[in-house]
Image (cartoon, rainbow, N blue to C red):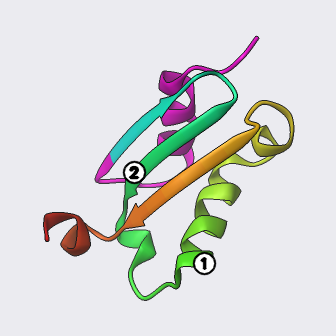
Amino acid sequence: MLPTPELVHQYINDNLACDHIEVQGDGSHFEATIVSTAFEGKSRIQRHQIVYAALGDRMKSEIHALSMRTLTPDEYKA
C-alpha cells in the first residue's frame, strides 16, 4: 500500500511537535512544508534530519522521496 499525503502528515505530526504541516504527493514522491519550534537555531540539514528521525524507517520502506521546506514559526509568518 502506498502512503497518502494524509498518512505522511500523520507520521510527521505523531513524532514531531509542529505548528503547521502541509503535505502533497502521489504515493511515493512527496513535498512538505513543516513549521516547528524544534527547527529554531538549526541548519537546513539539521532540520531535515529531525524530520527524517520523526519518520523513522518509513523513509526506507514506504516513502521514496520527500522534498521539505522546514521553517520556524517566525520564518513561516514572514
- In the image, 17 versus 67, the foreground residue is 67
Give the residues drawn in magenta, as a range: 1-20
Give whichever of discs 1 and 2 has the lower sequence position: 2
Q: How many residues crowd mark 2 within 10 Å: few (<14), some (14–19), many (20+)?
A: some
Callout 1–callout 2 Cβ contact below 8 Å: no
Q: Point out residue 7 in the picture as x, y percentages from the top left corner.
A: 55, 25
Q: How many residues crowd mark 1 within 10 Å: few (<14), some (14–19), many (20+)?
A: few
- In the displayed image of the protein, which residue is found farthest to the bottom? 41
Q: Point out residue 17 in the picture as x, y percentages from the top left corner.
A: 42, 55
Q: Point out residue 23 in the picture as x, y percentages from the top left corner.
A: 44, 36
Q: Is label 1 or label 2 in front?
A: 2
Q: Is residue 41 left or right of residue 54?
A: left
| Picture residue at 14% right of the left edge, 71% below the top | 78
Q: Is residue 51 left or right of residue 16?
A: right
Residue 3 is one of the magenta-drawn residues: yes
| Picture residue at 50% right of the left edge, 32% below the top | 10
Q: In which quarter of the image is the N terminus?
A: top right
Residue 40 is one of the magenta-drawn residues: no
- In the image, 6 versus 54, the foreground residue is 6
- In the image, 1 versus 28, the foreground residue is 28
Per the rendering, the mark at residue 46 is 1
Per the image, label 2 sits on a secondary structure element best described as strand
Q: Disc 1 versus disc 2: distance between alpha carbons?
A: 15 Å
Residue 42 in the image: above or below residue 25: below
- In the displayed image of the protein, which residue is found farthest to the top? 1
- In the displayed image of the protein, which residue is found farthest to the left? 78
Q: Is residue 3 left or right of residue 34?
A: right
Per the rendering, the mark at residue 33 is 2
Tell me where residue 3 sits by quadrant. top right
Residue 23 in the image: above or below residue 45: above
